[in-house]
């Protein structure tokens, strides 16, 4: 019961954080008309919120390591909901900027705290599937934000686009607090699925210090390369897609381009569920390396093949980017010390956001050259190859530390069986 409750609240949180953070871009269309302020000025009001979203993540993870993830998640839900409701009451650009900054500050809690909480609170045999499902809800939140903001804003005004989602989010926080008080959700769920060892409760032996350092260094390098690749590719994708679509269908408009890109990302979100399911049954390290190794091939294929074939290759690349996420999360959770897991996920998220400006710069710089996006994709293919080499450098000992599961779901690691018996 507790593990199911953690999964429900974690997925609701992932949907909420991406929904609330995505409302501003669409609501700004109505705000600029009401306040007679330039759209670019309204969008720029979210800069401090975006900065705090990444900068505060390590601190949020550290706090959860000390106080427990569940109480910090209550703060996330209630704080984010209150900030969104406050944004609905903003009467001038300055007050809206403050509320958006608060939204970014509370939103910074989710990724380091929510994911670590989920991994600790869900039974180990279902961790990969749970992470994949959680990723899907995040993708749905991204997709729902412009739609919800547009529908509510069109029907009741832009303030309702912030107010109603804020009320629902804060209510979820109150429900989580009630669940904690009643014992439906444990304050510290690490006892459900893991011990304090560096690689988890089912390790056949404790890794030496050098192994942990090498694993985290290799995983960190792979994640940094992946974050830079993702940022540059996602930024360039709409313009590149427009060129490929218009080459085949000259009558296509912006709506067609946007729809194609949206479908690509939604497919990637559903792919995370499948990837998580596989990560529960096979060594996540092997899945991680294999998926990353396909990225250089798909990037080159996107350049070599024109029209629909190139679009299919690009769509497959987005799918591979999303599929790598569950295995990456499991590997980080395995190698990071359990009492610093929230901080580790915070650093991961902060590093990913730090790579965003560099990716934007790369996409813009190559677009202004005579080589265009083809050269950018070739460069990103080389970066993906570096990421694959780094992933392959993760110590193989992790394969023996994981609880392997046969296709019928029975445990195949005798250490895991013994661990369950001791707990029972």
Image (spheres, helix red, strand yellow):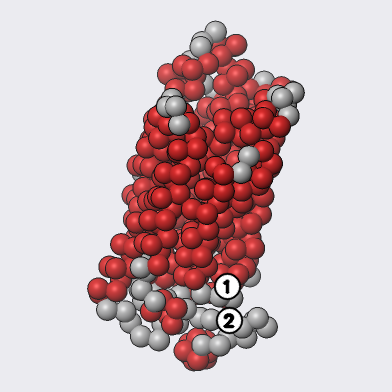
Of residue 279 and residue 239, the one placed in the foreground of this image is: 239
Q: Can you tell which mark lies on residue 280? A: 1
Residue at 51% over, 65% down = 290
Residue at 41% over, 50% down = 382
Q: Can you tell which mark lies on residue 405? A: 2
Question: Gap between marks 1 and 2, in whole Å?
Answer: 7 Å
Is the C-beta separation of discs 1 and 2 under 8 Å? yes
Where on the picture, by quarter, is residue 222?
bottom left
357 sits left or right of 162 in the view: left
313 sits left or right of 52 in the view: right
Q: Is residue 329 above or below residue 395?
A: above
Q: Residues within 10 Å of mark 1 (few under 14, many from 20)?
A: many
Which quarter shows the N terminus?
Answer: bottom right
In the image as oriented, which residue stretches furthest toward the left? 210
Residue at 40% over, 86% down = 204
Q: Where in the figure is residue 106, as x and y percent of width and height?
A: 45, 42
The mark nearer the N terminus, 1 or 2, is 1
């Amino acid at each position: 019961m507790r593990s199911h409750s953690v999964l429900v609240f974690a997925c609701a949180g992932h949907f909420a954080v991406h929904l609330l953070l995505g409302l501003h871009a669409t609501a700004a269309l109505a705000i600029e008309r009401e306040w007679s302020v330039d759209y670019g000025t309204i969008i720029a009001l979210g800069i401090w919120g975006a900065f705090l979203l990444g900068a505060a993540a390590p601190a949020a993870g550290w706090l959860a390591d000390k106080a427990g993830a569940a109480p910090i998640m209550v703060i996330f839900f209630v704080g984010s909901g209150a900030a969104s409701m406050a944004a609905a009451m903003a009467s001038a650009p300055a007050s809206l900027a403050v509320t958006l900054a608060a939204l970014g500050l509370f939103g910074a809690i989710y990724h380091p705290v929510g994911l670590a909480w989920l991994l600790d609170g869900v039974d180990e045999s279902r961790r990969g599937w749970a992470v994949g499902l959680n990723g899907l809800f995040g993708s749905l939140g991204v997709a729902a934000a412009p739609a919800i903001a547009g529908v509510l804003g069109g029907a009741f005004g832009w303030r309702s686009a912030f107010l109603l989602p804020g009320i629902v989010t804060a209510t979820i926080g109150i429900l989580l607090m009630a669940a904690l008080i009643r014992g439906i959700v444990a304050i510290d769920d690490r006892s459900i699925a893991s011990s304090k060892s560096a690689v988890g409760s089912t390790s056949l032996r404790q890794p030496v210090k050098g192994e942990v350092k090498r694993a985290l260094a290799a995983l960190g390098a792979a994640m940094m390369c992946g974050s830079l690749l993702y940022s540059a590719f996602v930024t360039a994708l709409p313009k590149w897609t427009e060129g490929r679509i218009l080459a085949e269908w000259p009558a296509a408009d912006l709506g067609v381009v946007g729809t194609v890109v949206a479908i690509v990302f939604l497919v990637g979100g559903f792919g995370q569920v499948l990837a998580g399911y596989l990560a529960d049954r096979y060594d996540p390290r092997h899945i991680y390396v294999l998926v990353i190794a396909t990225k250089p091939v798909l990037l080159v294929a996107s350049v070599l093949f024109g029209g629909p074939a190139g679009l299919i290759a690009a769509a497959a690349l987005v799918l591979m980017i999303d599929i790598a996420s569950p295995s990456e999360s499991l590997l980080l959770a395995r190698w990071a010390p359990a009492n610093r897991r929230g901080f580790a996920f915070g650093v991961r998220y902060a590093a990913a956001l730090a790579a965003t400006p560099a990716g934007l710069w790369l996409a813009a710089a190559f677009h202004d050259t005579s080589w265009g996006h083809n050269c950018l994709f070739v460069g990103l293919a080389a970066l993906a190859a570096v990421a694959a080499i780094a992933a392959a450098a993760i110590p193989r000992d992790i394969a023996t530390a994981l609880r392997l599961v046969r296709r019928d779901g029975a445990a195949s690691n005798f250490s895991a069986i013994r661990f369950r018996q001791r707990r029972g």
